[in-house]
């Protein structure tokens, strides 16, 4: 992949819940020595209460105004605030079975271990598996939407001369990360 290192300044990672956006974001942030955040951190208050739109925008705008960052999430209605600042977009476009395996495993592990996510929020077995607000159900609902919408976003961004990378297998993301970690060979 021939890409200028300057394009690694502000990376926006998208993909269906459970695909590994946050994991890749953390790894890239560590390699590039910059801050990583999830859009969910800006959106959810304690007790899974959504913030007011003005508060969300204030948090988001303050973050994307920085010189370098890694951001992950799928809040498409906020793309007008994110995309103009992003120097690279990465879409983790993995298969439905892979995503379902990952989201089910992740939800179960987080629930059992009582892992805190952000702003004091936790996943639970009941909410994760037996609720209409289930993150697993959300992934099922949004998988097809992403497959319809993100190819158009990819075409638009590439037509504008911007860097849009689509990984269809985790191995591709891993290889990309290795190249980033070995920046001298990233040209």
Image (spheres, grey):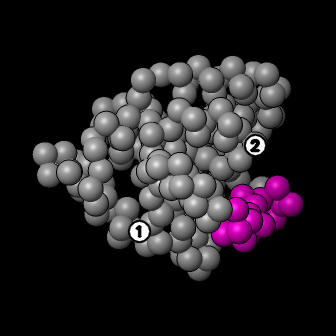
Please say whether residue 11 is visible from this viewpoint: yes
User: Is label 2 in a helix, a strand or a loop?
Assistant: helix
Q: Is residue 146 part of the magenta span, yes or no? A: yes
Residue positioned 71% across, 68% down in the render: 148
Name the main secondary structure of what is drawn in magenta. Answer: helix
The answer to the question of whether label 1 and label 2 lie on touching residues, with beta carbons closer than 8 A, is no
The picture places residue 91, in percent across and down from the top left corner, at 52, 59
Q: Is residue 114 part of the magenta span, yes or no? A: no
The picture places residue 141, in percent across and down from the top left corner, at 78, 67
Residue positioned 30% across, 32% down in the render: 33
Taking 159 as reference, is 46 above or below it?
above
The picture places residue 116, in percent across and down from the top left corner, at 58, 40
Mark linked to residue 77: 2
Q: Nearer the viewer, residue 96 or 166?
A: 166
Residue 159 placement, left or right of 140: left
The picture places residue 145, in percent across and down from the top left corner, at 74, 65
Mark linked to residue 112: none
Local packing at callout 1 (Cα closer than 10 Å; few below 14, some 14-19, many 20+) is: some
Tell me the mark number nearer the camera, choosing from 1 and 2. Answer: 2
- Mark 1 = which residue? 170
Q: CA distance from mark 1 to mark 2?
A: 27 Å
Q: Nearer the viewer, residue 67 or 187?
A: 187
Q: Which residues are magenta?
A: 130-149
Which badge, 1 or 2, is on the more N-terminal residue?
A: 2
């Amino acid at each position: 992949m021939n890409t200028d290192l300057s394009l690694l300044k502000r990376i926006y990672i998208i993909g269906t819940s459970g695909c590994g956006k946050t994991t890749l974001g953390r790894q890239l942030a560590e390699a590039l020595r910059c801050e990583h955040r999830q859009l969910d951190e800006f959106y959810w208050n304690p007790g899974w209460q959504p913030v007011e739109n003005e508060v969300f925008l204030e948090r988001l705008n303050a973050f994307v105004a920085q010189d370098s960052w890694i951001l992950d999430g799928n809040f498409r209605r906020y793309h007008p605030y994110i995309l103009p600042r992003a120097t690279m977009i990465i879409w983790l476009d993995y298969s439905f079975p892979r995503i379902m395996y990952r989201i089910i495993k992740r939800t179960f592990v987080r629930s059992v271990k009582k892992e805190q996510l952000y702003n004091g929020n936790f996943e639970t077995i009941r909410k994760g598996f037996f609720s209409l607000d289930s993150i697993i159900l959300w992934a099922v609902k949004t998988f097809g939407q992403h497959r319809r919408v993100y190819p158009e976003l990819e075409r638009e961004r590439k037509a504008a001369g911007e860097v849009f990378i689509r990984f269809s297998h985790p191995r591709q993301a891993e290889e990309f990360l290795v190249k980033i970690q070995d920046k001298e060979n990233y040209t």
